[in-house]
Image (cartoon, rainbow, N blue to C red):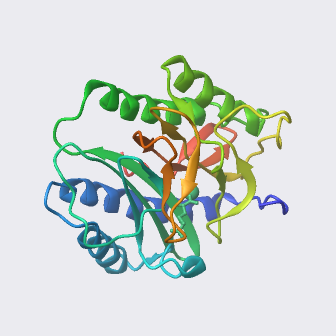
Amino acid sequence: MRDKIIIKTPEEIEIMKGSGDILCACLDMLGENCRAGVTTLELDSLAEQFIRDHDGVPTFKGYNGYPGSVCVSINEEVVHGIPCKRRIREGDIVSIDCGVTWNGFVSDSARTFVVGEVPPEVQKLVDVTKESLYLGIGQAQVGNCIRDIGQAVQQYCESHGFSVVRDLVGHGVGRSMHEAPAVPNYYTSGKGPRLRAGMVIAIEPMINLGEYYVKQLADGWTCVTLDGRPSAHFEHTVAITENGPYILTNGIH
Ligand code: MF3
Ligand code: CO
């Protein structure tokens, strides 16, 4: 994350858009299947099949030994939940994070799905987290700094009484899933790098209903809130262009 920022050509960005189109369609499909009774491992299999059917490779699989093609994080799980035999239940919020490698380029995106009815404050958490991602993306402009993104996310989420996870951040994306720069979702003492055309970053607010503290479980992956209250996560891969932010993982429209 500390290395040089790799600038992408317009042609490379279009390949990344192709990768992101597959990922967007995959997350649409997972959303249709994210229902009470389905296991998180079944969602993982559906994702892997879908990605391979579209000539992609599930980026996460084998990454630092990660076993799944997706991360599925339920309720107080923030990110990096490992697919298993656990069944999704009515009233869960389910964060699904997925990566696709296609023609040598990665796209990375996540959404939190609400299964059935949840308490109003939990629905609000999900809605505010999603909105904060778009506010962060709005700051992904040539001439702004990385810090402008996190500042927008934090200000909005905290104004609703929620908290921003500090221990995990967004990142550059390209031929690798994780490139420079780091993209915090909170205000930092330094401004961070200036945004230039051709940078591609994953913006991914992880927002908690309670306090921002998190811990990792003994499985070495799953990240949960310390207070056990719910957390939401939305992520898009975004290119910085002279014409403004270009979201690569929101599909064809
Ligand atoms: N999508 C995650 C991120 O944004 C990465 C998942 S970790 C993996 O950093 F091991 F599952 F790949
Ligand atoms: Co990411």
Residue 116 sits in quarter: top left
- Residue 77 lies, in percent from the top left, at 42, 52
Q: Is residue 208 visible?
A: yes
Relative side of 163 to 34, left or right: right
- Residue 136 lies, in percent from the top left, at 59, 34
- Residue 93 lies, in percent from the top left, at 30, 45
Looking at the rendered image, the quarter that the N terminus falls into is bottom right
7 versus 165 height, above or below: below
In this figure, what is the number of numbered marks? 0
Relative side of 124 to 213, left or right: left
Q: In the image, what residue occupies the spot 41% across and 39% down?
A: 229
Q: Can residue 138 be seen in this view?
A: no
- Residue 122 lies, in percent from the top left, at 33, 32
Q: In the image, what residue occupies the spot 25% across and 66% down?
A: 86
Q: Quadrant of ligand 1?
A: bottom right
Relative side of 99 to 11, left or right: left
Relative side of 212 to 40, left or right: right
Looking at the rendered image, the quarter that the C terminus falls into is top left
Considering depth in this image, is 226 or 73 the residue closer to the camera? 226
Q: Which residue lies furthest to the left in this view?
A: 37
85 versus 118 height, above or below: below
Q: Residue furthest top?
A: 159
